[in-house]
Image (cartoon, grey):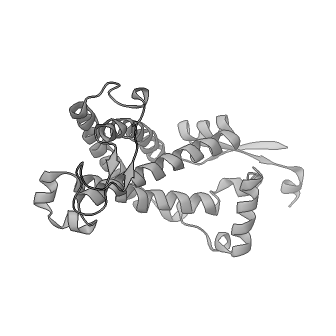
Amino acid sequence: MTGQLVRRHSVAVRITHWVNVLCLSILLMSGLQIFNAHPRLYWGKYGADPDPAFITIAQGFPTWLTIPSYQDLASGRNWHFLFAWLLVINGLIYLVHGFLRGHVRRDLWPERDQLKPRHLWQEIMDHARLRFPKGDEARRYNALQKMTYLLVALVLLPLMVLTGLTMSPGLDAAFPFLPDLFGGRPSARTLHFITASALALFVVVHVLMVVLSGFWNNMRSMLTGRYAIEHSGSDHEA
């Protein structure tokens, strides 16, 4: 086996990635602080203590998972709003750069051969068996990665931002269509919680795959932009 370092991530992608890590971490922990102040979710235009809850968590989340670590709704909101706007700005920078420099089209949009049912099924089986791409195939993201990243960047994150904005009375006054878009502010809060939970699950799976597929190699690629791929003798002969 021989190794080769290839360029995988641009400076802009690496910086926005780590800013996202910081923002999502603070948003999750401050969001749990906010949720603990009223650990019930509703559906529709009304949501108060006497109303039937859509989701109820009896004890809330442990304080070691929240920012701040003690019950302080006002501070939790301040942390949450600050890093929410930073996430929005960072996301816009990533998307503008990604479309202008071709990163989305070149690296994230699935190629035609990757969308063939047989290829997709093979990728699913390889992931289930923890078999990861080698050689030239490792130069690009696989189809499951691409579709997941596009789902997060173009669906989950925008939905989380919009539902979060809908919970702001000031923004609702400026854009009165926002509550109607989600069937009311209580529904927006529920969707915000569900979307954030989906993103948290994505992060857990993403980190697990980073570790299992080669932690140091993946970390180097996100820190320096260089990713090592391995070629077998048969690869060179081909």
- Please say whether residue 107 is visible from this viewpoint: no
At x 24% / y 31%, what residue is drawn? Answer: 75
- Image location (x, y in percent) of residue 182: 28, 65
Compared with residue 32, is residue 141 higher up or lower down, i.e. above or below? below
Q: Name the residue nearer the viewer: 210 or 172.
A: 172
Tell me which corner region of the image, top left, top right, bottom left or bottom right, holds residue 60: top left
- Image location (x, y in percent) of residue 213: 70, 44
Compared with residue 39, is residue 67 higher up or lower down, i.e. above or below? above
Tell me which corner region of the image, top left, top right, bottom left or bottom right, holds residue 96: bottom left
- Image location (x, y in percent) of residue 1: 85, 43
Tell me which corner region of the image, top left, top right, bottom left or bottom right, holds residue 120: bottom right
Compared with residue 70, is residue 178 higher up or lower down, i.e. above or below? below
- Please say whether residue 46 is visible from this viewpoint: yes
Quadrant of the snapshot with the C terminus: bottom right
Q: Name the residue nearer the viewer: 119 or 175.
A: 175
Compared with residue 147, is residue 167 higher up or lower down, i.e. above or below? above
Q: Name the residue nearer the viewer: 14 or 155.
A: 155
At x 27% / y 63%, what residue is drawn? Answer: 44
